[in-house]
Amino acid sequence: MDAQAFDSVWDALEDTAAEAANMRARSALMIALRTRIESWGESQAEAARRLGVTQPRLNDLLRGRVDKFSLDALVNLAGPAGFSVRIEIDDAA
């Protein structure tokens, strides 16, 4: 069996380059959001109110359940968390 090398775990797991790119963006946003939320030192209920989501929804985010969030949903949470989101477009290698 030949060893394969991938740029990210998402490239190994997803079927297409587009799906892998979407998952990379979603996971990066989730990590940034989780770090910001944890820095607030608030309860999950308080943080959920601050972001305009339910506590169970916030719990899904904090537990890294990336499959439960679209890229749009995460971008919408970025504003209330105090983030500005920019997309960088590069030529494919």
Image (cartoon, helix red, strand yellow):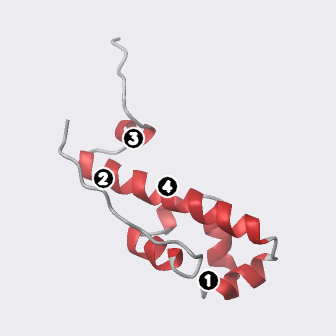
* CA separation in Å, label 3 and label 1: 30 Å
Spatial CA distance of label 2 from label 1 is 27 Å
Q: Nearer the viewer, mark 2 or mark 1?
A: 1
Which of the pair 9/7 is nearer the observer? 7
The quadrant of the picture occupied by the N terminus is: top left
Q: What residue would you read off at disc 1? A: 51
Q: Give percent across and percent down for residue 64.
A: 60, 58
Point out residue 15 in the picture as x, y percentages from the top left corner.
Answer: 28, 44
**Residue 55 position (above or below residue 85):** below
- Is label 4 in contact with label 2 (beta carbons under 8 Å)? no
Cα distance between the residues tagged 4 and 3? 16 Å
Mark 4 and mark 2: Cα distance apart in space:
14 Å
Q: Which mark is residue 13?
A: 3
* Among numbered discs 4 and 1, the one appearing first in the sequence: 4
Sort mark 1 into few (<14), some (14-19) or many (20+) by Cα contacts within 10 Å: some
Question: Is there any visible trace of residue 20 in the rendered image?
Answer: yes
- Mark 3 or 2 closer to N-term? 3
Distance in Å between CA atoms under marks 4 and 1: 18 Å
Secondary element at image label 1: helix
- The mark lying in front, picked from 4 and 3, is 4
Q: Residues within 10 Å of mark 2 (few under 14, many from 20)?
A: few
Q: Which residue is mark 4?
A: 28
Above or below, 15 against 68 in this view is above
Q: Which residue is mark 2?
A: 19
Helix, strand or loop status at disc 4: helix
> Relative to 1, is 36 on the left or the right?
right
Residue 12 position in % (x across, y down): 37, 36
Q: Amino acid at mark 1?
A: Leu
